[in-house]
Amino acid sequence: MSPPAADRVRRLVESLEGVLGKRWVFHRDEERLAYSYDASLARARPDVVCLPGSTAEVAAAVRAAVREGLPFVARGAGTGIAGGSVPVAGGLVIGLARLNRILEIDLADRYAVVEPGVVNLTLDQALGQQGYCYRPDPSSQKVCTLGGNVANNSGGPHCLAYGVTANHILGVEVVLPDGSVTELGARHVDPLGYDLTGVFVGSEGTMGIATKVVCRIARSAEGVRTMLASYARMEDAAASVSAIIAAGIVPAALEMMDGPIIRAVEEFIGAGYPVDAAAVLLIEVEGLSEGLDGAVRSIESLCKARGARQVRVAGSEAERQRLWAGRKGALGAVARLKPRYYLHDGVVPRTRLLSVLQAIADAAARHRLTIVNVFHAGDGNLHPLILFDPADADETHRVHVAGEEIMRACVASGGTLSGEHGIGLEKNDMMDWVYSPEDLEAMQRVRSAFDPEGLANPQKVFPARRGCAELRADGHGGRPAGEMWI
Amino acid sequence: MAYPDFTPARDCVSCGLCLPHCPTYRERPFEMASPRGRIQLIKGLATGELTGYEALDEHLSLCLACRACESACPSAVKFGSLIESARAVLNDRLAPSWGRRLGAFFMRHVFPHQRRLAAVAALMRAYQASGLQRLFRETPLRGCFPERIVELESMMPEMSPLGEMPAPRGELEPYGVERGRVGFLTGCVMQLAMASTNAASMDVLRFNGLRVVLPREQRCCGALHLHNGFIPEARALARANIAAFEEAGVDWIVTNQAGCGSTLKEYGKLLDDEPDWAGRAEAFRGRVRDINELLVELGLRPPSGRLALRAVYDDPCHLVHGQKIKAQPRQLLRAIPGLELAEAREADWCCGSAGIYNVTHTEMSLAILQRKMDDLLSTRPDVIVTSNPGCAFQLRYGARRAGHAVQVVHVMDLLARSYRGEGAGLDRSATKGEPS
């Protein structure tokens, strides 16, 4: 770091310590390293980390960074899988873990006001005690925070029926990149004027930091049934997905897992997944209790007609929870197969599922890689995981090439780059596969309206044309390339 | 691979699913106080990327090593051996301070020697039994001492009577038909501060038709050493114990201490690079059973003495996370006629005892203990039941701090009472204040 930059960092530390107290400001080597990652493969150390305890402190932290011309990145629980909270340009990481209070729950008007560090499941459980729920349920919901959900417009298995985060956020209090505080949206639907909440949700930290989130809440369904259909052939599972949707049934969730994932998960959870199956569908229906048995029977016969070997209905809430624990722990369980995975988040039209899955299998064969699949089949949101060992440089290179081919196949099929994980650092250089320069320029102008200085989470979302080598060179010499990026 | 072994760090995909299960992260919501953060720091230590050893120690020593993260980890990262390895490396690299010298002195020269440890315990017992402790606790005298001394004094566990301190040795006949031969680990602290629980445990084994063998040469299991990175000392103790129990020719090696059991089961890994010992350590490991585990495995002979008690069971970390033993102690308690078993919401969370953690990190330990007591007492128990001495001391201290008369006992204390038929007159009112 050049001396002037070191001076700026020192001044930033001093002013942060003045506002937050030394206890909540970190800048030693090991502390910076501990904020250099999320659940993706990206790694980059910030210069300083702070954990503010109020909106005013967040605003003060943003002002302090901007005053020194240093970038800032908001961070929730660090469970993102696109590198969104990795401070690739250094600067300040503003951790929101201390802002973890549920401020208000209004059942009559159906909203809850929370701080951004509240864990998704914590809100859902607080509502659950009163017969209500918060619908979006990312697989990491027991860890990930609502602030991060807002930033990434996160999805989850149940978004098939209920929509993604954007459909459930009524308003946000935001610290803008100039350090001022404003409110977007309202506590009710359809406020007047531009839908700025809609602009902000999914902006991945490039338009400011949400410090309060107004979440739409819903009544919990009266009844729920969860089924596990197992198949000897992946094609039959894919055909069943299309058949269920074509029959006019909209399950609350419709998830697919392939054989290798099933086996890894079964070893972890022991939920009774059939380890000899080539694919399973995890299907959930919910609503008024009366209609559910009929829906279960229709789905069962549709699946069996398309080759399901067995359709098992969870007999108890505990069994249902175990099935879901398997699905939601799937990503981590994959590490039992190989040390790391590179996860994609492509979306394809449901009818093209099978051909894209074939393209993925072809890419795996061509590049001698293991690729496993767990995904939201109902809305065509694929999650192929390319497994590799970062110690193997050649394999790591092949992973990169295969990943790009898979994303090209998704886009070519009429799909897109990301269903729910965000663009972050992982997909930003692919944005121009989907958008024209004019499209990107228009988006860039919106971003600049919020952040003219470009200090709010820079180098994310938009193509940075940085390339792997450059990313690796961001002050992290001496580590194997695969650990950093692929 | 023997210690230090950093290969498990490769299995971490930094998904973060461990975060909500970490007691220290719940108190201090920053990454360095979380399992994921610690793994990254340990990686940095292992690769040489991080060399600020004092700073690393500050963060890594905050870990309870409760291994709740292991139970939560979908990638099966072996966190326990990672943190032990890191502590071993740091022990070599840190500049010696007075506190570290004192700790090392106890690890090397007191804990491995039952007689020296007994001498310390006898002093503590003398202090407690002579009335000095009462004088200290109940008069303004304590105002003359630094706060830290008063705090440490208040945490001191009650020692067993001097007459019970010498560890029993030899063989004890089974009651009834013999079903097998078990070697019993008397432990170090257990025999000095919970001697009656050891006696109860041996009785329960005998009531279940087991011959109890107590090898003379058995030593401390080395758990404290292993957990705090004193690897050579842990290895020496492991070798001594393996030889002692081999000599005894037993079917199983049994312990009533979760922490010891977890370490005994790790002897295989601990010695796997010593050609003379690897095979023997592996064979030994295969015979080790926690006492709850063995009784369920063999089929408990149902006790008949009635205990009209409402009990709540608190999982020791080294049983539930370290050995994945969760159902067995509950199953045994439910077998006691009249006993009503309540379930706490966070039974599988650490109580903050964690070996010597309550002494080295008292503030964090007490914050965790406070939550634990609130959770356990909300079930309105007559007795709190656990299965490890460290947890028992900590929970007793928690009850004293809360001014609550609840008893804290071992699963075997209750089973023995039921077997001995002493349960007949033991109802809710009779339990108050009775020593366990």
Image (cartoon, coloured by chain):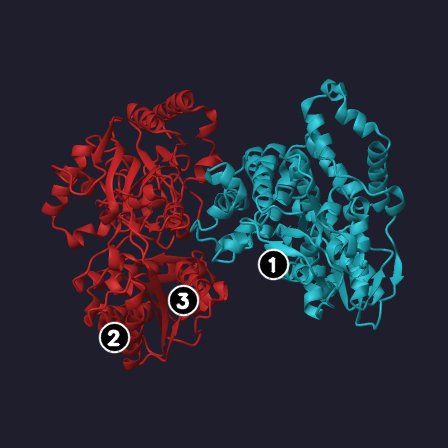
What's the chain of the residue with tag 2?
A
What's the chain of the residue with tag 3?
A
Towards the viewer: B14 or A273: A273
Horizontal and vertical percent for residue A222?
Answer: 33, 59
Whether labels 1 and 2 share one chain: no
Q: Amino acid at mark 3?
A: Ile
The residue tagged 3 is A261
Q: Amino acid at mark 2?
A: Ala
Q: What separation in Å lies between label 1 and label 2 (alpha carbons)? A: 42 Å
Horizontal and vertical percent for residue A88?
Answer: 33, 40
Whether labels 1 and 3 share one chain: no
Secondary structure of residue under mark 1: loop
Q: How many marks?
A: 3
Towards the viewer: B27 or B397: B397
Secondary structure of residue under mark 2: helix
Whether tag 1 and tag 2 are in contact, CB under 8 A, the answer is no
Q: Amino acid at mark 1?
A: Lys
Q: What separation in Å lies between label 2 and label 3 (alpha carbons)? A: 20 Å
Rendered shade, chain A: red
The residue tagged 2 is A239
Towards the viewer: B22 or A186: A186
Horizontal and vertical percent for residue B255?
Answer: 74, 57
- Name the residue: 31% across, 46% down: A149
Of tags 2 and 3, the one toward the viewer is 2
**Colour cyan, chain:** B
The residue tagged 1 is B326
Badge 1: residue crowd in 10 Å (few <14, some 14–19, many ≥20): some
Secondary structure of residue under mark 3: helix
